[in-house]
Image (spheres, rainbow, N blue to C red):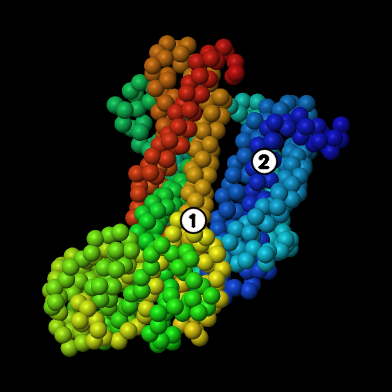
Amino acid sequence: MTSCKLIFRNVRKNIRDYLVYFLTLMLSVSLFYAFNSIHSQPALADLGATKQLLADQLGILISALSVIVAVVLSFLIVYANRFLLKRRKKELGIYMLLGMKKGRMARIFAGETLCVGLLSLVCGLAFGLALSQGLSLLSLRLFAVDVSEFQMVFSADALRQTALCFALIFLIVMVCNVRSIAGVKLIDLLTAARKNEGLAVRNPAVQVLLLLLSVLCILAAGAIFQRYGILPSRENAWFQTAAALLAAGTVLFFFSLSSVLLTVLPSVRSVYLRGLNAFLCRQIGSKIRTDFLTLSVVCGLLTVALCGISVGVSSAMTMNEASKAALPFDLNVWADVDVSGDTDIAAYLRSRGVDLNRYASEMTQITLYESELTYADLFEGQDVRLWPIDSALPDIAVNIVSLSDFNRSLALQGREPVSLEEDAFLINCNYKGTLEYITAFLRSDQPVTLGGVTLRAQSAEVLNETFFMSSVGNNDRGSLIVPDAVARTLTKADNMLLVQYREGADSDEVLQQMIPIGLEWETEGYRYTEKNMLNEMYYGSCALLVLLCCYIGLIFLLVCAVLLSLKQLTETADNVYRYGLLQRLGAPDRLVYGTLFQQVSVFFLAPLPLAGLFSAFGMGKVTAIVSEFMNMHISTHIGVTVLLLLLVYGGYFLATYCSCRQMVRERPYTGEEG
């Protein structure tokens, strides 16, 4: 039989084993192509300066993510291929027993890998082309680009990147296969399940030094991330350096720690000789050469999963709470007095054909005043560390609102009014970036002088009200509430019309009429914020990103759980005769099942401490970035993350143990390997 016929026959015969391998490759190719083709969408080339900056940053992040995804996929594909090779070692042993040369065996297995790989590459690209169109539409929505600008595009650059990446992966896989087959002996193929793997490094001093080196690499990576942040940049290579150090440190940590433990435990006789611990150590040590790499990858995926879920859930909860307080009105129309003049906003809108009386149940106009008092005056003497977006805030004049206007805004929301003495002031602030500094100013009991009148703080507590809306929700960085008599001596800066729709009002109709007025902001001085539009464009887009973040985190968590589960199920199936032999030698079922439980526990729990440490550091950094991007403080809700971890990760752990226990129970020792 020719090699080609044998290759195709083997692929058909082992179609069930190759099905998981094929699906993994196909999905990997499609996702890799789809994410790398987003920038080929022509509509994204016509963005404004700010959006273009965000789009460029998105491109940098996707490029960095593609490298990480490629590394993860390489490991998973090589790992899946090693699994296939292991499952067929006896078949290859029979070929060798019948006289087939190792070179031909290597060519046959490489041919099978190439055959499945080419088929998965073609199918993956076809599926990825369809998926990329959906991602392009999603990108247009996130950047508020008219979806009518969407064009179906085939990205030649993404195709080249995908083909090159996976050709390199297939080449690595085939080289690994050739080396594995060429270097193995017939007895190894026929007794693969019985052969234990030894420690790669037996010198205890070298093992300890490797463990210390791994810790140093991890600490160095943490110091670099702390100094330069966790966002990649084209300007410097610190991110790549830190990522490489972290990856190397993690791999070295699991490699050296497992070796150290397996060297130390036998010397602790009271532990090693208790129960079946000697057998347990041999079981764990039997696959040490491959398990340390598996645990390293699982640790990395768990870190991403925990960060994604925690930040996503925290952002969703924070935004849900903030949206209730940030949108108290249906419509908020601003008028810049310097451009529009001191006008009646409702009357001006009627002159432009927008009669809000047709839609509004209530509306009122309030005024913001300006003075020589700046935020630097309020922050004086404090160690102020503002968010980057607020770097110019100290030079900006503090907003001033009269008591009557502030109470009219509260009345429109159905809230109780506040009272104020004639020689006093209050401060309203609902912005997390300045709240602590405003509070410190109030508690210092410093007076302020406005319009020649000196006012004292009536209360040391900051009011937390929303008396106007803007495009970023709760963003009152600090407004002084002063008596009406004081406000009348100041210069008007902005007028604002606050509107509540009547029941059944068509908000889309209002928006269509307001669009031309909003486009004339620079010439006419009027702009607007509408509740439904804000929900859809700001909170809707951010919520979508949050859901994607949670989704990716959950997928990574599932991948980790499934990877460890399948590994333990495979090893238990290969070694079930050993547990049967223990029962045959008189070991009680309680000890046998307890040892099995400990073995599964070790592999599921080993990545968690280091992943938890990485996640705690990463969540702080990612939360700071999300807070700055959404202009609000994100509080971490770790409880939900722990609950999901227990449900998903813990659920797979229990299911794996129960399945392994069932294997041991149903397949007693018979003198055969099983």
Secondary structure at numbered mark 2? helix
Which residue, given by chain and number where applicable, does mark 1 sit on? Answer: 504
Disc 2 residue type (three-letter): Leu
Disc 1 residue type (three-letter): Gly
Q: Residue at x 80, y 36 (%)?
A: 7
* Residue 5 locus on image (x, y percent): 85, 35
* Residue 328 locus on image (x, y percent): 37, 61
Which marked residue is nearer to the observer: mark 1 or mark 2?
A: 1
Q: Residue at x 64, y 60 (%)?
A: 136
Q: Earlier in the sequence, mark 1 or mark 2?
A: 2
Q: Is residue 378 above or below residue 162?
A: below
Displayed quadrant of residue 83 = top right
Of the numbered discs in the image, which one, if any, rests on residue 376? Answer: none
The 10 Å Cα crowd at callout 2, few under 14, some 14 to 19, many 20 or more, is: some
Q: Is residue 307 above or below residue 661?
A: below
Which residue, given by chain and number where applicable, does mark 2 sit on? Answer: 23
Q: Is residue 176 visible?
A: no
CA gap between label 1 and label 2 equals 50 Å
Foreground of the two, 337 or 117: 337
Q: Dividing the image into 4 quarters, which one contains the C terminus?
A: top right
* Residue 380 locus on image (x, y percent): 21, 79
Q: Is residue 498 visible?
A: yes
